[in-house]
Image: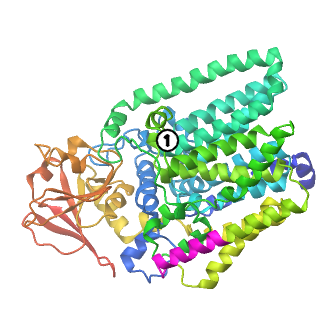
Amino acid sequence: MIMNIFDRIPKPVYFPILLTIIVMILSLFNLQGSSVGMYNKYFYGASYKDSNVIMGQPRAIRSDEWIVQTTLLQSQAELDFPLINNISGLKENISSISDVPAKNWKVLFHPSSWIYFIFPAENAFAFKWWIRAALMLISIYSVFYLLSKKISFSVIGSLLFFFTPFVQWWYSTYAIECITYGSFIIYFFIKFYTASSLLQRLKSYIFLTYFSICFAFTMYPPFQISVFYFCLFFLLGYVIQNGSFLRNKNNIISYVLMGISYIGIVGLSLYLYYMDNKDVIDILRHTVYPGSRDVAGGGYDMFQFISGFYNIQLLSDSKKLPPILGNQCEASTFFMLFPYLFPVTIFITVKQFIQNKKVDFILIFIMMYLFLCTLWLFTGLPHILARITFLNQVTQNRLIIGVGMANLFFLLYYLLFVKIPQNIDFKIAAFISALYAFFINLYVGFYFQSQSSLFIKNNGKIILISLIVAVLVWLLILKKRNLFLGLFLFFSIASTLGINPLYHSLGPLLHSTLSEKVQAIHKSDPSARWAVYDNIILGNFLRANGVRSLSGVYLYPQLDLWKNFDVTEKYINIYNRYAHVYFVYNNKEPSLFKKLGEDIFVVNIDPCNKDFAKLNVKYYVFLTKVESACLKQKANIPYSSMPVFIYERI
């Protein structure tokens, strides 16, 4: 009977079904990839053996995930998914600029959040963690299966995207969604464009419109603009290459009518979104950080651009990175092989023009996109052109997502469709390109070693990495497809497996001694606000447990809150930003607000200050015992590495 069921399922659907089953199993057993275990490391010390770690290790560098996004999700679940979250400072519309579940029409276009309305919060978190990956894999698999009709090739192609350093290090951000929705837009546009019946075209049109709105609602322009232009260039190439569909008058009429309604629906959705969140958008546009951007372009470091194959070194937190790479997340990139392939594809394309043969416009438009983006990265574009195209809103390190996506599409498309000369001259050219790749990566490796001997000590490893790149380039150019894909996928997995742990539950955040004590106090006094002193990680910890906290992450500045402390707005340039916030008290320090970084500031204020009383701040969290006439100790959690004291204002 089971075999009969499988016989009825089309083989191309096996991969999506398998992914769905895996997601359901992992969610059922409450397994996910969060670094939430970092709370245990802070409470008990770095040597603490966390029984919830199944594989890998939690990473402090993933703070945007375990301090910010994970706690925001849990905060919404604690409050039963409000549109306005009233425990973040005074109140905050976090659902307007973050993919968190909220009882609002916008959640229809955040499909990974739907599960929160069905599953318990921890299982929903696990499901959300994995469904984002599954949707990305399915979207890319669908595109390449549509183009090639090759199941195994399409599966491996999607896995190459997933096991990319940039994707894994930026997993908790909108990078995943931008790639996913961008790929679905490509897929359903092609289905719409090539549909053989009006009903098929209508189905594709509905999904195309839906995923376009999903893409628009990710609301992270630096990633969106980069990916949008890749999708546009790819689809322009596709339309030009398949222009025969435009010769049918009925096709043209349906394209025009549906195209007009598509623009109208997406435009109306964006307008409604803007009207719902006008106040927040206006505040964000006038912040100091991230503020309004006007990026000039140019100046991107060549070593960082081609450093992808050395991202394998980022797996160890103890390695000191070369200064140009910054931290592990900023250093992560894609395996940029397209520069080595460019001369070959340019030669083949020029030859097609000269010999008046059919030209591959998809390939040409992908190359045009990569060329223009590379130009923007290293030399910049005229300012007027940058403003018209909105590239002035995209910093160079955020443009990499589009370049990396195009790079992988370029390699896979070349392997599928480009016909190469079968002669000795071409093989010699492939060998020369591989040799060039070897010496370039050798030079990069020794340069990194000279900048930080701790980053890569072993000369043999530099030679091995360079040799792997050379072999990959040789296999790629000669279209040894299976060998190239096998080696490339193996190196990709080796470079990324372990970036995020496999972790069981959100226990350190929700079921620890501290969280139980906080929840008990909150239950007896739910209207009181809290403040955290001398610590950046506990503000959002409180919010995740349903507590109203002035400490934590502010996705946009709450000017009305900070004016309680700064009536004259003397320090507005410090607190008018996205920021992590906590309190300190040093009566010898005259500054009330102090910026510690672009996204961190502290408020220097006596816990007995009357402004706290006005805001109903009743409970304070300290990491040391304090003596104060207005405070009495409420609880003491004697963690071995970071003892926590809770005080009540009297």
Q: Quadrant of residue 171?
A: bottom right
* Of residues 253 and 645, the one drawn nearer to the viewer in this rendering: 253
Q: Please check the rendered image and state whether residue 449 is part of the magenta-colored stretch, yes or no.
A: yes
Give the percent coordinates (x, y) of residue 433.
Answer: 73, 64
What secondary structure is the stretch in magenta mostly built from?
helix
Pick the residue in front: 348 or 311: 348
For label 1, count other residues whose C-alpha is less than 10 Å away and answer few (under 14), some (14-19) or many (20+).
some
Q: Is residue 556 visible?
A: yes
Residue 617 among those drawn in magenta? no
In this picture, is 557 found above or below 165?
A: above
Asked if one can make out residue 55 in the rendered structure from this viewpoint, the answer is: no
Q: Quadrant of residue 606?
A: bottom left
Q: Position of residue 365 (x, y in %)?
A: 69, 40
- Residue 61 versus residue 14 in the image, above or below: below
Mark 1 — residue? 381
Q: Which secondary structure lies at badge 1?
A: loop
* Left or right, 279 with reference to 268: left
Q: Is residue 351 left or right of residue 210?
A: right
Is 27 on the left-hand or right-hand side of 200?
left
Q: Residue at (55%, 60%) from the top-left corner?
A: 305
Q: Quick one: quadrant of the C terminus?
A: bottom left
- Give, as a single range, the part of the protein colored magenta: 439-454
Q: Residue at x 81, y 31 (%)?
A: 242
